[in-house]
Image: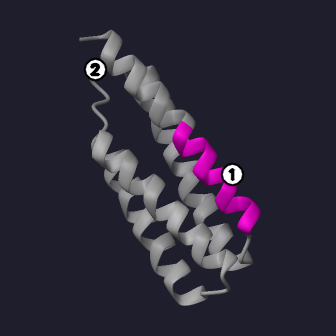
Amino acid sequence: MDSLFLAAIESVGSARRHMEAGELRPCSEDIRRAFAVLLQLSQSLDLSFDSDVQGGLESVFAYLRTRLMEANSQRSLRVLQEIESLLEIVHQGWRENSTASV
């Protein structure tokens, strides 16, 4: 899952940079890529392991997918910054949790 988190963070960061430069087509492509990665993250959750935590992550991923659609339709740099920040926070928490459980 670590590589998926990194791919999502990179795609959102790239979308943000393209939006800042006014490059809307590559921005939209990066947003679509991030959306697909978030779907992969959701599908990789194991609800039998810790359903409360995994269900919480699914809710976060669903929220982020919704915000990606909003960022794309509204051309909102602020929303992309929010998504990027939240992804980094969730990724860090996931890494700490997976390290602690090993």
Residue corresponding to mark 2: 49
The percent coordinates of residue 69 (x first, y second) are 60, 69
In terms of image quadrants, where is residue 44? top left
Name the residue rendered at 32%, 20% in the picture: 98
Asked whether, in this view, residue 57 is left or right of residue 49, the answer is right
Q: Which numbered dot is residue 82?
A: 1
The percent coordinates of residue 25 (x first, y second) are 53, 89
The percent coordinates of residue 31 (x first, y second) are 51, 71
The relative height of residue 58 versus residue 34 in the rendered view (above or below) is above
Front residue of 15/1: it is: 15
Residue at the extreme left of the image, as rendered: 102
Which amino acid, by three-letter code, is at mark 2? Phe
Q: Magenta residues: mostly which secondary structure?
A: helix
Name the residue rendered at 31%, 53% in the picture: 40
Front residue of 72/51: it is: 72
Asked whether, in this view, residue 23 is left or right of residue 95, the answer is right
The relative height of residue 11 versus residue 20 in the rendered view (above or below) is above
Q: Which numbered dot is residue 6?
A: none
Look at the image and give the residue range highlighted in magenta. 77-88
> The N terminus lies in which quarter of the figure?
top left
Which amino acid, by three-letter code, is at mark 1? Glu
Give the CA separation, mark 1 to mark 2.
29 Å
Regarding mark 1 in the picture, which secondary structure is present there? Answer: helix
